[in-house]
Image (cartoon, rainbow, N blue to C red):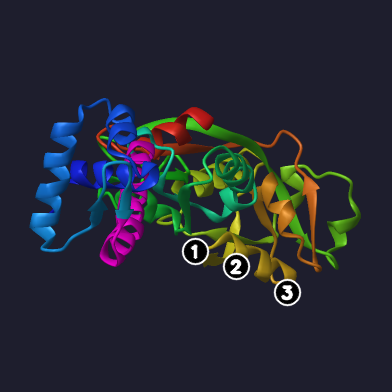
Amino acid sequence: MLDIKPLRYFVTLAETRHFGRAAARLNLTQPPLSRQLAALEAALGVTLIERSPRSVTLTVAGEQFYNDARAILAALEQSTRNVRAAARGDAGQLSIGFTMCAAYSVVPGYAKRFGAAYPAVALHLREVVSNDLAAQVAAGQIDAAIMFPGAQKKGLAMREIVSEPLCVALSRNHPRARARQLRISQLAGEPFVLATEQVAPTLRAAIVEHCRQGGFEPDIRFEVQLQQTVLSLVDEGVGIALVPASMRRAQLAGVVFRPLLDAPQIEQVLAWSPLNRNPCLAHFLALV
């Protein structure tokens, strides 16, 4: 493998076409410059320059090597910039997992702001069933997760980033769809669609507890994994649901959302491993 320093010397000589000017630009005297270039020609086994007392002329091989050497040096400089940017977290990759609720609340804004601040970072967004998120962060499969706080994992750091009330999702044809707002007691006897306890334990617990405060046990007719499925069943008119307020942005044609008086607040947290040394993660944490 060729030493890079003789390449720089040769490119400088090719651009100045004069040993004296090239040596001055390189902060050298002429003898060591001449020795370096002679050694380069010997290593290549070709003549690169035709020497004369007043100037230097490149041979055909020299012209070719000049073009190649410039490309090599430019690639090396770019590689140096790239690796320094990666070390700072200004370039590289970052993977963030999130629940469907987060997809309608904070994820779009975070993606926009992070992308604008760090355009050279490839941001991978993964919508994941919420009970899997903590395990994926702990295993290093994703760098961070936006999730409900119940699915905690030992060794993860967490920060609350979302707090929003529950609201009522009803079919547009439901008798209570015309109400401006609803109390939980008005939903007694209604068939409910809920996420399973395994998927979103804190969300489900908050819904069940609020129903109990309203004086009844919820009639859970359907249990599903995804909030989108919850709304699809509501759209079909087979039940109602209590969902985080940001889910109103789903905008299903057959579903209306109504405020719930004295609604409990539903939190989501950002979870990450303190052992994760991805510098891009540090930038994301600072942004959030």
Give residue 135's position: percent from left, percent from top. 30, 50
Quadrant containing the N terminus is bottom left
- Which is more toward the observer, 273 or 3? 3
Give residue 232's position: percent from left, percent from top. 67, 70
Give residue 111's position: percent from left, percent from top. 57, 46
Q: Can residue 288 be seen here?
A: no
Q: Secondary structure at mark 3?
A: loop
Total number of numbered labels?
3
**Which amino acid lies under the numbered mark 2 shown in the image of this protein?**
Thr
Q: Secondary structure at mark 2?
A: helix
Snapshot quadrant of residue 143: top left
What secondary structure characterizes most of the magenta part?
A: helix
Bounds of the magenta span? 58-86
Mark 2 residue crowding within 10 angstroms, few (<14) / some (14–19) / many (20+): some
Residue ranking furthest to the front: 53
**Residue at coordinates 74% horizontally, 69% vertically from top-left?**
235
Disc 2 to disc 3, how far (Cα)? 11 Å
Snapshot quadrant of residue 113: top right
**Which amino acid lies under the numbered mark 1 shown in the image of this protein?**
Gln
Please report whichever mark, 2 or 3, sits nearer to the chain's N-terminal start.
2
Give residue 165's position: percent from left, percent from top. 67, 38
- Which is more toward the observer, 134 or 41? 41
Disc 1 to disc 3, how far (Cα)? 17 Å
Q: Secondary structure at mark 1?
A: loop
The label shown at residue 236 is 3
The reply to whether discs 2 and 1 touch (Cβ–Cβ < 8 Å) is yes
Instruction: Please name the residue that numbered disc 2 is placed on.
Output: 229
